[in-house]
Amino acid sequence: MLADAMVEKRPWPRLPPSTRTSTLNFACELVGINTAIFSTGGGNVGIGFAVPINMARLVMNQIVEHGRVHRGRIGISIKDLSSPIGAATPAGLTEGAVIAEVSPGSPAGGGTYRRGSPSTF
């Protein structure tokens, strides 16, 4: 009877368990925060996705310290060599990427990166 009364006084709305839980390891340490679930039937049975706790902690600390999240960027967008842009690269390259765009004023904009340059990783 007491347990039933406690269940009714939950501070959160009644959501499927996979949407309101955290990801724990076997030592009950927090290792992730659940964010989404992919389900073909639209229910709560499927593949769950979680943000790793080290990433969540980094974001939290940046928001507390700076009021926003700072992300690094290079300033280029790439295309696969199989795309139409990739077809225009020198013959013989079949793997890798080609630089599709270099953002002006970005870190890559002041370097030697140019649109159409092939790159293999």
Image (cartoon, grey):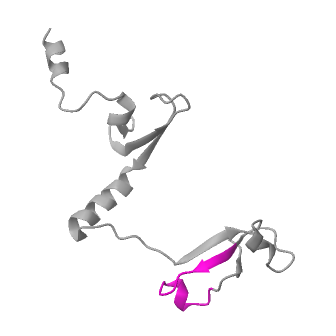
Measuring from the top left, give residue 91's x and y in whole percent: 86, 77
Residue 65 appears in which quarter of the rendering? bottom left
- Residue extent of the magenta highlight: 98-113
Measuring from the top left, give residue 44's x and y in whole percent: 44, 29
| Above or below 79: residue 107 | below
User: Residue drawn at (77%, 67%), measured in percent from left and top?
Assistant: 95
41, 21: nearer the viewer: 41
Q: In the displayed image of the protein, which residue is found farthest to the right?
A: 91
| Above or below 4: residue 101 | below
Does the stretch in magenta take in 66?
no
Residue 34 appears in which quarter of the rendering? top left
68, 2: nearer the viewer: 68
Residue 92 appears in which quarter of the rendering? bottom right
Q: Quadrant of the N terminus?
A: top left
| Above or below 109: residue 6 | above
Measuring from the top left, give residue 98's x and y in whole percent: 70, 75
Along the horizontal axis of the image, is 101 left or right of 20? right
User: Residue drawn at (49%, 28%), measured in percent from left and top?
Assistant: 45
Along the horizontal axis of the image, is 69 left or right of 110? left
Q: In the displayed image of the protein, which residue is found farthest to the top?
A: 1
Measuring from the top left, give residue 10's x and y in whole percent: 18, 27
How many numbered marks have been drawn onto this rendered protein structure? 0
Does the stretch in magenta take in 104?
yes
Task: Answer whether residue 104 is visible to the viewer in this image.
Answer: yes
User: Residue drawn at (35%, 29%), measured in percent from left and top?
Assistant: 17
User: Residue drawn at (46%, 28%), measured in percent from left and top?
Assistant: 43
Task: Answer whether residue 27 is visible to the viewer in this image.
Answer: no
Q: Quadrant of the C terminus?
A: bottom right
63, 86: nearer the viewer: 86
